Amino acid sequence: MGPPFAVSLGDPAGIGPEIVAKSWVMREARGLPSFFAVGDAASLRAVWLGPVEVVSTPEEAAEVFGKALPCLQVADAGEITPGMPSVDGARTAFQALEVAVGLARSGSAAGIVTAPVGKEQLYGVGFTHPGQTEFIAERCGVAPHNAVMMLAGPSLKVVPITIHIPLAEVSSVLTIDLIRARAITTAKGLQRNFGIGRPRLVVAGLNPHAGEGGALGREEIDVIRPAVESLLAEGYDIQGPIAADALFHSRARETYDAALCMYHDQALIPIKTLNFDEGVNITLGLPIVRTSPDHGTAFGIAGKDSANPGAMMAAIKMAAEAARARLTPGC
């Protein structure tokens, strides 16, 4: 058995501590691997009466996992009130993320799972990245365009080509090189993390009806199709651009392993509609395994014992599956 997974608790005032604790409770029923929390143990005790044991190493965490939720204490988040984020809490979340990444890079942890953070709070303590994905990529020495955010659930995998930018800027940001880079990383990531020997990719159009032959926009003609054709010429199994409104029904989903979408909501609306409680954010292109539940801090329900741990459990399970796939020859 390999090392346990490091699960950063995210913002102490969010639902991260609650869903991590609930995942530990369900560890046997859901077949979860050994894992340990990284953050402030007080945030767990603030929302849960179960057993928590502070540990100093991943090895110690593996030893106590069967009887208590191990927590690697990184900082004191101060007074923790669920639903009320604070500067100290954001600083603790930042430090927990840093420690978790370091443990995974050193091989002390099998990979990392990141609970949600409040970006507004993080920006107030010196965090300068658009999100946790970009921070982890930098710490791993990976260029931002080579780290791909894939949202994965039981019935769909999607990759947004552009992510956190205004919709009005999408057209100007899309380039042949960007689409190619995202597609190549996606194909390699499906092979390495999911064991798919020859991934089938599909690319969505940007405009209604995929541009209607140029009548509704030329992005498909000038950018998207040339990118797809160049990848086809290199041997990739890829098709598109295809009208986005025809990509996500059940018969269409049987024809591809992942859909590349042109902007954030084009990708996230279908995945959250189909797999809201089981959606996982997995970062492709990293030397380490990293997953995260596909939802936010949910400060509004924090501390009310109403947070659904489904996506966190799915993220932990997917991290284990990706780690196993990476050990398979040829992946």
Image (spheres, rainbow, N blue to C red):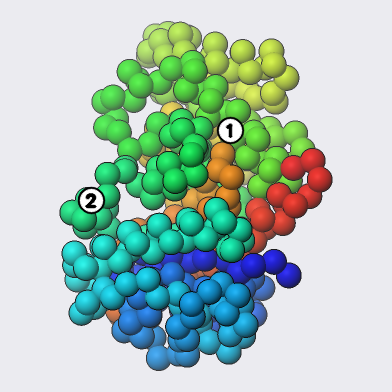
Q: Is the residue under label 1 in contact with that under label 2 (CB below 8 Å)?
A: no
Q: In this rendering, is residue 260 above or below 2?
A: above
Depth order, front residue of 109/309: 109
Q: Is residue 200 left or right of residue 114?
A: right
- Asked whether residue 7 appears in the rendered view, the answer is yes
The residue at the point 43 percent across, 34 percent down is 144
Within 10 Å of the Cα at label 2, are there few (<14), some (14-19), or many (20+) other Cα atoms? few
Q: Is residue 196 left or right of residue 164?
A: right
Q: Position of residue 85 (x, y in %)?
A: 21, 67
Nearer the N terminus, badge 2 or badge 1?
A: 2
Q: Is residue 290 left or right of residue 121?
A: right
> On the rendered image, what quadrant is the C terminus found in?
top right
Viewer-nearest of discs 2 and 1: 2
Amino acid at dot 1 = Thr
Amino acid at dot 2 = Gly
The residue at the point 66 percent across, 41 percent down is 190
Q: Which residue is mark 2?
A: 126
Q: Is residue 279 left or right of residue 59?
A: left
Q: Position of residue 105 (x, y in %)?
A: 55, 53
What label does residue 196 carry, if any?
Answer: none
Q: Secondary structure at mark 2?
A: loop
Depth order, front residue of 252/167: 167
- The quarter holding residue 48 reads bottom left
Q: In this rendering, is residue 220 above or below 169?
A: above
The residue at the point 58 percent across, 18 percent down is 228
Q: Position of residue 283 (x, y in %)?
A: 52, 46
Q: Which residue is mark 1?
A: 185
